[in-house]
Amino acid sequence: MTNENILEAQNLRKSFGGLVAVDDVSIQIAKGSMHAIIGPNGAGKTTLFNLLSGIMAPEDGKIFYKGENITNVAPQRRAHMGIGRSFQITNIFPNLTVLENIRLGAQAIGKDNFRFLTLAEAYPGYVEKAMAVIEMVGLQGKEGMLARNLAHGEKRKLELGIMLSTEPELLLFDEPTAGMSSEQVPELIEIINKVVRAYNRTAILVEHRMDMVMSVSDRITIMALGRLLAEGSPQEIAHNPQVQAAYLGDLYGELG
Amino acid sequence: MKNIWKKDKGFVIFVALAFAFPFIFSLLGQTSLTEGTNKFWQGQLINFFIMAVFAMSYDLLIGYAGMLSFGHAASFGGGAYTVALLLEHVAPDILKSYQIFIGSTNITEIVILIVCFLAAILVSILIGLLFSASAMRVKGAYFAMLTLALATALNLLARATDFVEWTGADEGMHGVPVPLWINPTQNRLTFYFIALAFLVLAYILMKRIVSSPTGRVIQATRENEDRARMIGYNPVTYRTLAFVIASVFAGLAGGFYALWTTSASPSMTSGVTTVNVLIMTILGGMGTLVGPLLGAGIMQIFSQFLYTWFGARWPLVFGIIFVLIVMFLPYGIVGTWRLQGFKIKQGWQRLLELTKTKETPEK
């Protein structure tokens, strides 16, 4: 393993009953890169993410983060190690305010989680951090709103904000633009791109629409039916005949 | 502390009224402070204060931590039995052989009471941990069933004839020797103020806890467990904490209840007791803390009036009122007010503006 890889998965396997959702998947994520994993629905992308973030345990295979075996490390521990994750289905704290949603993330990596008798607001550091994140994702002016009252696009931004609030080094984005209207998508992609580049972080981005990730990714992995189909730079992927046939075929076929 | 008036006007007014109540009642009714109807209503309020703490502790569980436990009475009964058992079987021997006085104050009695409540805290922590350890890994209805089963087991333990010499089995313990200066029969006014102080202290502590960093994480685990885990919190740790904290307050309330009734009986650990606080909490509004306080007040005080108006049929009337409240105020009284209150204010404002525009054309 090279030091340049922040994350390395070896021969991961996970099945649900008879369905093998992730089948012998190995992947290396270079530090500081934006790595997209794309594939049609049901390709096993979210399952792979659940393995990488620790929500599910693989049946086989190993996961290394910064050279350390984290295959059996609990998700909350991984969060403290610097792995953050967003969810495909909006996963926020609906009855808390926007500020509180993000403040909780900032607090999580601090040392004040077991204080019972002081007000949470008595730790302005977390509030300041949260406000910075709110600005980063473009939710200024909505701090006091209950998260469930946000519009869908704003919820996606909040989802992103919660993830950023723990200051992760490795960001796992599970279809961050899911359900957003096509006008809103570029803005969110731009925010993600900015965050990753400006703070020199590493991101893995799962999408099922290829056009979204072509311009921002350094490297693209194609998944289908639980297996890796191809991997390369965006140009290589776009010109890979196998990929075109299996995945892009429909799209470009119609256009042609 | 300086903000308590700003944030909690209602509670401050309530405490002031509760503090002044015996005196006002005595002035208005020309009655003695320590006898007759005044003493009776002090008793009703004492009952209310203690049940309010119990109901608020239940709110920590179901309102803030989102755990629907049907076994909360186990902690309440546990506290009651601990205090009653120690007062009945341990304290008399100590008092017989060993007493220290400072002036006319019997220090030994005070120390014994403190030890009783420390023991009640310890027992309720253990009950909280027992419940957490066995029920924390399941959710929803399974969690509710497991907690009910555990509470029933403790209820059976309280009823067990094997320990009849100690616990009185089905009969429970009655006439537990409570020190004279705090005895609710002889010195009810003293007990009244101690119970009020207990309520105020418990409220402030619980309010602090739910607003603390830990309390916020507890609410986060209620809202979304997966999310909480992914930002680095272990939900089981925080839910266990919430369970133990709620159990401690319930245990203390139980201890006070044992002092107040000078008894401990199996019904204190029964499902009916849990359902009572559940009704109080739902009436007032889950996750509001003052809601269950209000709910306890309605249950304890209002039911007295219902009893005088409707006699033995009062539970039927109360049931109908409860159903109506749940139908029309689904978040409880305080909860619905917090969610919809601004709409009422808006509507009121609009109404005022309408009356203004009506007046101007006439001029």
Image: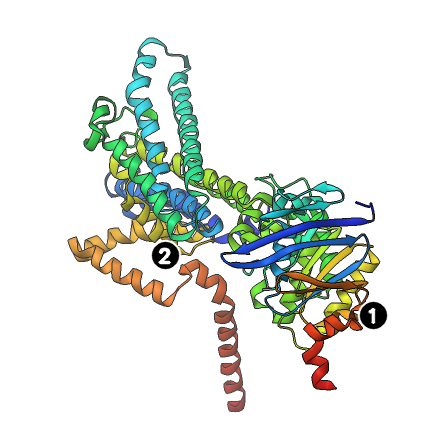
Query: Which scheme is used to colour this image of the protein?
Result: rainbow
- Label 2: state its secondary structure: helix
Q: Is residue B112 left or right of residue B318?
A: right
Q: Is residue B211 left or right of residue B141?
A: right
Amino acid beneath label 1 = Gln
Subunit under mark 1: A
Residue at the image position 30 percent from the left and 32 percent from the top: B184
> In terms of depth relative to the viewer, which is nearer, A166 or B310?
A166
Q: Is residue A227 left or right of residue B24?
A: right
Residue A85: mark in rendering: none
Report whether residue B329 is seen: yes
Q: State which mark lies toward you, 2 or 1.
A: 1
Q: Are marks 2 and 1 in contact (CB under 8 Å)?
A: no
Amino acid beneath label 2 = Leu
Q: Is residue B131 left or right of residue A83?
A: left
Q: Residues within 10 Å of mark 1 (few under 14, many from 20)?
A: few
Q: Mark 1 — residue?
A: A235
Report whether residue B197 is seen: no
> In terms of depth relative to the viewer, which is nearer, B296 or B326?
B326
Q: With respect to residue B362, does B332 lie above or below?
A: above
- Label 1: state its secondary structure: helix
Q: CA distance from mark 2 to mark 1?
A: 63 Å
Q: Residues within 10 Å of mark 2 (few under 14, many from 20)?
A: many
Q: Mark 2 — residue?
A: B283
Q: With respect to residue A79, does B90 lie above or below?
A: above
Percent of width and height locating residue B56: 42, 46
Percent of width and height locating residue B316: 21, 58
Q: Quadrant of the C terminus of chain A?
A: bottom right
Q: Quadrant of the N terminus of chain A?
A: top right
Residue at the image position 51 percent from the left and 52 percent from the top: B222
